[in-house]
Amino acid sequence: MKKLIWLISCLGCLGAVANVQASPEDDRRSVVQGVQKKFPDIKFEDYVHGALAFSPDAKAQYDAVMTFPPYDAEIEKGAKLWETSFKNGKRYADCFPRSGKNVAGNYPMFDEKTKKVVTFEMALNQCRTANGEAPYKHSDMNTMGLLTAYARTLSDGMRMNIKVEGKDALAAYESGKRFFHQRRGQLNFSCAGCHISNVGNVLRTEYLSMAPGQATHWPAFRGGDYSLFTLQRRYAACNQMVRLVPLEIGGEEYNNLEYYHSYLSNGLPLQASVFRK
Amino acid sequence: MNVLRIAARMAVGGSLLLGGVLGSGVHAADDAANPSLTDEASLALANATSVVEKAKVKGALWTTATGALTQAQEAAKKQDSAAVIQHAAVASEQAFLGMAQLGYPLMGN
């Protein structure tokens, strides 16, 4: 009898775990299918190009810039930061599996100990503090931004592989999902209102990109002066666009948002430090 | 939207009224900071500042609310009570609307 109860309760756990995992995957699939239905000619892999997928001209300009990226010197600065040893002789590469190759696609990940989402930027800072260095500010593009501009290139080609396991992770995911679908700002728009419901439509002069693929290619160098934008800096810019005062870059709300948002890119290949208008 | 606007006006008006009832003693600190602002203007500014802060904490602060609060603060520096009241009302209204927006149904699936 005891065995039977044990067996039944364990089947119950398995069921619960399966349910938890099904839900984000259902979300992702339905968002991807929405894009596929509206744009059957755009290949899934090409979602990483975002708005460029709707405009051959813009894509041609992108390809031209990417042949010899004018911001290569910036990525070099990032490489220098990455390779410089800490005072204790350790390096960033010592903090990550495979010396930091093919890791970025696992971030953000959920840390069961702190019950918090850990972004790649946070992992880099944890590496710094564990080795006696002061953390960088997440909003500082000249340190954290440049460092990620190089560190993420080490994961080029890796498929986004975000995991949501357990009820605390799911709660963080759900909080990010709520943010994505919550109307904000004086213009009363949610992220989803632009990047799910209005994909492919033109806002002023820009095609609106699809949510899946949006998290795969950061940081981006934007505009005529190639300003460096981390993903969360882009969140801040989109918030500002609808007249919302941006939230803290590296704060818990944006981290949870990044967790959900990155999950939507699962299965798509990473390519760091691309050009964007 | 109109309902919210009225509610925001009422909230602002209500606290003005309260301020009147409570008298100037409560707001002596504000008055000291801005000796030539009227009680009403000091109170409106204090109210707007606190509503804007609340909206910010909730991640619901509209740029229009901060913009209006900045204008109210500038007006306070110039000791222009009428302008303070006018901008502070806009700031608290816009901050209030931002917070109310968080109660809207979720959008876009």
Image: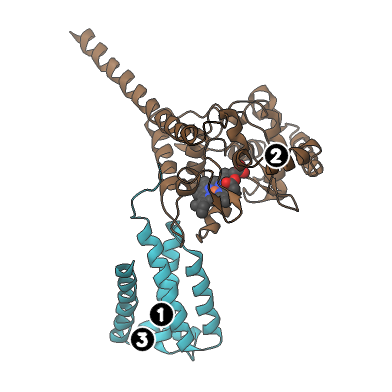
Q: Nearer the viewer, residue A38 or B61?
A: A38
Please provide percent x and percent y for residue A146. Answer: 72, 44
Kindly report the distance in space between the C-alpha atoms of the residues bearing marks 1 and 3: 16 Å
The chain displayed cyan equals B
Please provide percent x and percent y for residue A205. Answer: 61, 54
Residue ID at (28%, 85%): B21
Chain A's shade in the image? Answer: brown
Q: Relative to A51, is B40 above or below? A: below
Amino acid tagged 1: Ala
Q: Are marks 2 and 3 on the same chain?
A: no
Q: Are marks 1 and 3 on the same chain?
A: yes
Protein chain holding label 3: B
Secondary element at tag 1: helix
Disc 2 target residue: A273
Disc 1 target residue: B44
Disc 3 target residue: B25
Amino acid tagged 3: Gly
Q: Relative to A117, is A13 above or below? A: above
Q: Relative to B56, is A123 above or below? A: above
